[in-house]
């Protein structure tokens, strides 16, 4: 285990697993802005140290950092011995749907096994406050939209199943009889829809390894000239223009949702709660392409390809529960998402 140095501080420390990743790095910025000090553990399996350096550039102070794999209980124990955490935010994990179908065992070891190790070390140190980075994939193929937290859960691939397994584990932990709990668990599950965009400084953003799995970084790389064209999978869905509709949320809105959830832990008490983080509005693939063309001034050539197995026509959130209970709602619209994504991509054509 290697670590960055840390100066004494009176601000509450928050452990951020996977804090060098796309969402984690933006959450670190918002934690600093809200008066917390992020302490990051990351093994850089799908992130880069430069992201944390740039968080420091934006905030005037870099997160405390430990290079560590969550499946290393000894190293994790040493981190907990050095800090008194006010809460844990858990982002670390693998996230590519297609890859998960090829190497499912790796996904279960990292996503489920790493969470088990984290929770065991938390319990050993009397820490019970946890915010888990979940996903709208736990809703499977929903019968209707918008999706709210009472919908049944299911999964259609190993990635989604690993998220759902962790949710089930955390709910079981929180529901265990109080007398049998090492700590009274206080857990929030945040189910994201589709994070896009970047910090408005253009210094941190989404930097996928290899060919992007998600729509917007793929569109951005076509616009910048790294990729020749976009494949649009299906144009015969029952949607506004035949292409799939999804709920895209600005990553800064998403990050602020985590800070709201962190503050909510202080008043919620023991238990396990789930919240959707989305805008409540869906945009089609072609609407996203047109919006990115407007923001970038570049054409994004595309071709229509066959539907992908498992894709659904439309998926967007009902985020009313987060608004009512956490006082959070998304602020940024589609144009802002595209402008910030293009500022990041054009300023960092090769990522970090």
Image: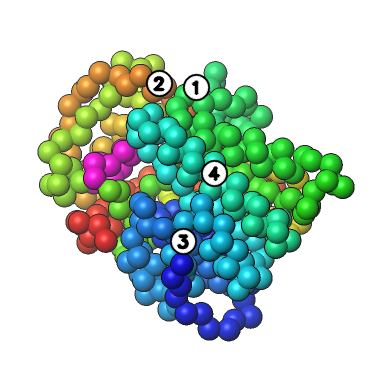
Dot 1: element: loop
Q: Are marks 3 and 1 in contact (CB under 8 Å)?
A: no
Q: Position of residue 258 (x, y in %)?
A: 57, 55
Q: State yes or no: residue 214 in magenta.
A: yes
Residue with the mark numbered 4: 113
Residue with the mark numbered 2: 310
Looking at this view, is 216 or 109 the one in front?
109
Dot 2: element: loop
Q: Quadrant of residue 150?
A: top right
Mark 2 or mark 3: which comes first in sequence? 3
Left or right, residue 267 beside residue 323 = right
Mark 2 or mark 1: which comes first in sequence? 1
Comparing labels 3 and 1, the label whose residue is closer to the camera: 3
Residue at 77 percent across and 54 percent down: it is 183
Mark 4 or mark 2: which comes first in sequence? 4
The answer to whether residue 277 is seen in the rendering is no
Left or right, residue 102 beside residue 258 = left
Tell me, for residue 141, which label it has, or none.
Answer: 1
The CA span between labels 4 and 2 is: 26 Å
Q: State yes or no: residue 145 in magenta.
A: no
Q: How many neighbours does mark 2 have within 10 angstroms: few (below 14), some (14-19), or many (20 or more)?
A: few
Q: Quadrant of residue 307?
A: top left
Q: Which residues are magenta?
A: 210-220
Q: Are marks 2 and 1 in contact (CB under 8 Å)?
A: yes
The CA span between labels 4 and 1 is: 26 Å
């Amino acid at each position: 285990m290697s670590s960055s140095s840390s100066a004494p501080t009176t601000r509450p420390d928050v452990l951020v697993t996977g804090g060098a990743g796309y969402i984690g790095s933006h959450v670190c910025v918002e934690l600093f802005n809200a008066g917390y000090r992020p302490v990051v553990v990351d093994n850089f399996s799908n992130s880069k140290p430069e992201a944390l350096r740039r968080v420091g550039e934006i905030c005037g102070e870099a997160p405390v950092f430990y290079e560590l794999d969550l499946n290393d209980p000894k190293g994790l124990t040493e981190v907990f011995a050095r800090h008194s955490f006010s809460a844990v935010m858990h982002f670390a994990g693998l996230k590519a749907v297609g890859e998960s179908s090829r190497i499912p065992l790796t996904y279960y070891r990292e996503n489920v096994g790493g969470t088990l190790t984290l929770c065991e070390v938390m319990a050993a140190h009397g820490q019970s406050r946890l915010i888990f980075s979940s996903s709208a994939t736990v809703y499977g193929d929903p019968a209707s939209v918008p999706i709210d937290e009472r919908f049944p859960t299911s999964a259609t691939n190993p990635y989604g199943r690993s998220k759902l397994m962790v949710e089930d584990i955390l709910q079981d932990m929180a529901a265990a009889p109080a007398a049998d709990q090492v700590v009274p668990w206080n857990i929030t599950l945040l189910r994201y829809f589709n994070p896009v965009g970047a910090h408005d400084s253009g210094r941190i953003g989404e930097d996928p390894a290899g060919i992007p799995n998600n729509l917007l970084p793929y569109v951005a790389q076509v616009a910048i000239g790294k990729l020749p064209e976009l494949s649009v999978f299906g144009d015969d869905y029952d949607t506004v223009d035949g292409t799939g509709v999804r709920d895209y949320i600005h990553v800064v809105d998403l990050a602020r949702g985590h800070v709201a959830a962190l503050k909510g832990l202080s008043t919620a008490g023991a238990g396990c709660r789930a919240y959707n983080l989305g805008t409540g509005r869906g945009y089609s693939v072609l609407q996203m392409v047109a919006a990115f063309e407007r923001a970038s001034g570049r054409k994004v050539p595309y071709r229509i390809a066959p539907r992908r197995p498992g894709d659904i026509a439309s998926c967007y959130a009902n985020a009313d529960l987060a608004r009512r209970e956490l006082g959070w709602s998304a602020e940024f619209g589609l144009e802002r998402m595209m402008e910030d994504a293009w500022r990041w991509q054009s300023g960092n054509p090769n990522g970090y």
